[in-house]
Amino acid sequence: MGAGTVLLFTKHLATCPRRLPESQAGGGFLLIDKAHRTLWALLVMLAVQGVLREESRLRGQVPDSAATVRGWVVEYETGVPLEGATVSLASGPDSLPGVVARISGPGGTFFFPVVPPGLYRLSATLLGYMDLRDTLRVESASDLELTLPLSVSPVPLEPIVVDITQRPIGPLAGFERRRRKLRGTFITREDIEASNPFEFTDLLRTIPGTRLVPTATFGQRVTFRGGCTPDLWVDGTHVSTRGDIDSFLRPEDLEAVEIYRGPETPGEFGGNLCGAIVVWTRRGAPEPAKAEGTSLRRQLTFAASFVLLAFLIAR
């Protein structure tokens, strides 16, 4: 801006206005006597009014034709007000400049105090909802109230993959732990079903160093290399191996079997230098009475077979 002019009114000067030396700002001081005070005051007032009108024009004073736009953003499905939605009046086909966007308040409300008349692109967006887009015509000096419903739109997320590993409980937890860490031969229920054995000892026939020896009661007992007899453990209980092992261990009742030879045997199954056979059943240890009955039936079956064979030979 240019230099200003200061009017100094005084009653002590009787002469015509005269100009003082210029100030450092490049302007000057004008001294006016009492006779010309009213005229100069009127001129100053007119000049100030002109400056104010120019400033109003430059600052974009609100035109009389401007409208107001207010409203609410709500959820379409429930009608609940939505806070934090972005509402925008962008430039439309009329090439009007857009209006600064508004954010809906706690009650879902928004307000545009000054909107020039024309056609705008209206939009409302909020995370988790479908965008609303439409055109809005604003008439001159109008007061518009809008309700903008937004429909819920699920946000796509990466699929969640849950890997569930079934962990054995009870005695089988120890079986799985030893199978991972120790040396030995381990037979699972899946292995038993795959081999479909007729007798328990059928599971042991293919294990290196294992030998099946007939007993005096038409049964079989297990020995390892060198003829030694391993210990037998059933569901954590030490069981005698002097009888027929097939008489009380049936394949359909077995859940898992562990076979250790010599130094492979863990301390929890005794200190037999020959080794150990550890059996885990599906229903716990077999009932002694049931085992004895089974042994008696097996003996009678073998005896009847032997008598029938002798009778056929005699003929």
Image (spheres, helix red, strand yellow):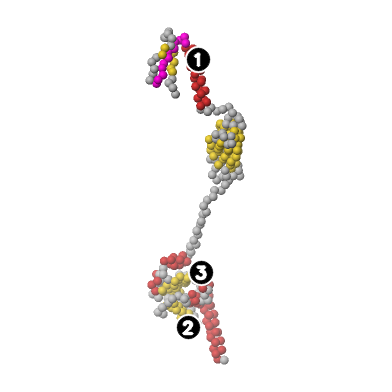
User: Which of disc 3 and disc 2 is earlier in sequence?
Assistant: 3
Which type of secondary structure does the marked residue at label 1 adopt? helix
The residue lying at 53 percent from left, 74 percent from top is: 196
The percent position of residue 182, horizontal first and vertical second, equals: 41, 68
The residue lying at 52 percent from left, 54 percent from top is: 159
Which type of secondary structure does the marked residue at label 2 adopt? loop
Disc 2 residue crowd, few under 14, some 14–19, many 20+, Cα 10 Å: few
122 shown above or below 172: above
The percent position of residue 284, horizontal first and vertical second, equals: 50, 69
Magenta stretch, residue numbers: 25-36
Disc 1 residue crowd, few under 14, some 14–19, many 20+, Cα 10 Å: few
Q: How many marks?
A: 3
Q: What is the spatial separation of the Cα atoms under label 2 and label 3, in whole angstroms?
A: 33 Å
Which is more toward the observer, 300 or 102?
A: 102
Q: What is the spatial separation of the Cα atoms under label 1 and label 2, in whole angstroms?
A: 143 Å
**Type of amino acid under label 1:** Leu
Decide if residue 21 is on the left or right side of residue 190.
left
User: Which of disc 3 and disc 1 is earlier in sequence?
Assistant: 1
Decide if residue 102 is on the left or right side of residue 263.
right
Please name the residue that numbered disc 2 is placed on. 216
Please name the residue that numbered disc 3 is placed on. 190
Please name the residue that numbered disc 1 is placed on. 42
